[in-house]
Image (cartoon, rainbow, N blue to C red):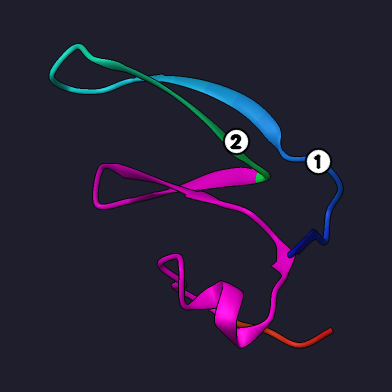
């Protein structure tokens, strides 16, 4: 897998439970009060099978 937008940014997020999670993402959006983080990547079908893919595009 290759990051399409360069290395992702580090995010530190506090969950509603108070737990803190560190993750890497290119950006985020808000959906029904939830934050949805995204990473732009070029990945084979086998690589995509190992993660939850919510959208696909061609460039």
User: Where residue 25 sits in the image (x, y, percent)?
Assistant: 61, 42
Above or below: residue 37 compared with residue 16: below
User: Residue 42 lies in magenta, yes or no?
Assistant: yes
| Tag shown at residue 7 | 1
Rendered residue at 44%/73% (across/down): 54
The C terminus - image quarter: bottom right
Rendered residue at 24%/52% (across/down): 32
User: Which residue, given by chain and number where applicable, does mark 2 sit on?
Assistant: 24
- Magenta stretch, residue numbers: 27-55
In this picture, residue 5 sits left or right of residue 26: right
Nearer the observer, 31 or 13: 13
Above or below: residue 27 compared with residue 54: above
Nearer the observer, 18 or 49: 49
User: Where residue 5 sits in the image (x, y, percent)?
Assistant: 83, 54
In this picture, residue 6 sits left or right of residue 44: right
Q: Secondary structure at mark 2?
A: strand
In this picture, residue 11 sits left or right of residue 5: left
User: Where residue 29 sits in the image (x, y, percent)?
Assistant: 48, 48
Residue at the extreme front of the image, as rendered: 46
Disc 1 residue crowd, few under 14, some 14–19, many 20+, Cα 10 Å: some
* 2 and 1 marks in contact (CB < 8 Å): yes
Rendered residue at 53%/45% (across/down): 28
């Amino acid at each position: 897998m290759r990051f399409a937008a360069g290395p992702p940014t580090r995010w530190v997020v506090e969950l509603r439970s108070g737990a803190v999670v560190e993750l890497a993402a290119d950006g985020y959006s808000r959906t029904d009060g939830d934050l949805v983080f995204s990473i732009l990547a070029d990945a084979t079908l086998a690589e995509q099978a190992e993660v939850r893919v919510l959208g696909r595009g061609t460039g």
